[in-house]
Amino acid sequence: MGHSMAEQSNKENVVETQSQTEAASGIIINASQMQSIDISDRFTRTLTETGWRITLEASARVTINFITSMRKYEVTLMQNDIIERDSDDLILIRNHPADTYRSQRNVSASPLARNTNRTQASEPSTDGTD
């Protein structure tokens, strides 16, 4: 009898662990307002008791389209970040500090194109022979 009680308390602990979400940063969205999610790269989707969990396998641009007034929310998520549907909550769990995503956003704005433009613009002025 004592043995089965120990098993029971272990199961309770497991449930407690599952209900807790830890993230470096994140966003929680009302899932009933959501129409669709567009993920630009590889991911894995797992069903849970209260919804599902998507784990990103690479950095990706995630676009959440809302039902109301064609609004949408765009965010860059990185490898191992999670999008979780938990009943009425849609939780975007970022496992890296917010600063990491700010630098990620700058990277995705094609630094190559910016550098080329800058060089071309400065050539005539430094040349001076026009």
Image: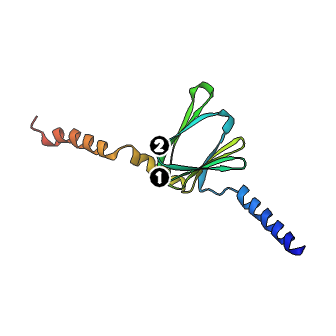
Q: Position of residue 116 (x, y in %)?
A: 25, 43
- Amino acid on which disc 2 is placed: Ser
Residues packed near mark 1 inside 10 Å, few (<14), some (14 to 19) or many (20 plus): some
In depth, the one of 84 and 48 nearer the eye is: 48
- What residue is rendered at 21% in x and 40% in y? 120
Lower position in the chain sequence, tag 1 or tag 2 = 2
| Residue sticking out furthest to the top | 69
- What residue is rendered at 66% in x and 33% in y? 33
In the displayed structure image, the side of residue 70 where residue 30 appears, left or right: right
Give the residue pinned by disc 2.
Answer: 40
- Amino acid on which disc 1 is placed: Ala
In the displayed structure image, the side of residue 45 where residue 59 appears, left or right: left
**SS state under label 1:** loop
Q: Position of residue 75 (x, y in %)?
A: 52, 43
Mark 1 vs mark 2, CA separation in Å: 9 Å
| Residue sticking out furthest to the right | 1
Q: Is residue 21 above or below residue 39?
A: below
- What residue is rendered at 52% in x and 49% in y? 43
| Residue sticking out furthest to the bottom | 2
- What residue is rendered at 47% in x and 52% in y? 58
In the displayed structure image, the side of residue 126 where residue 92 appears, left or right: right
Q: How many marks?
A: 2
In the displayed structure image, the side of residue 85 where residue 5 appears, left or right: right
In depth, the one of 115 and 52 nearer the eye is: 52
Q: Is residue 122 above or below residue 80?
A: above
Give the residue pinned by disc 1.
Answer: 58
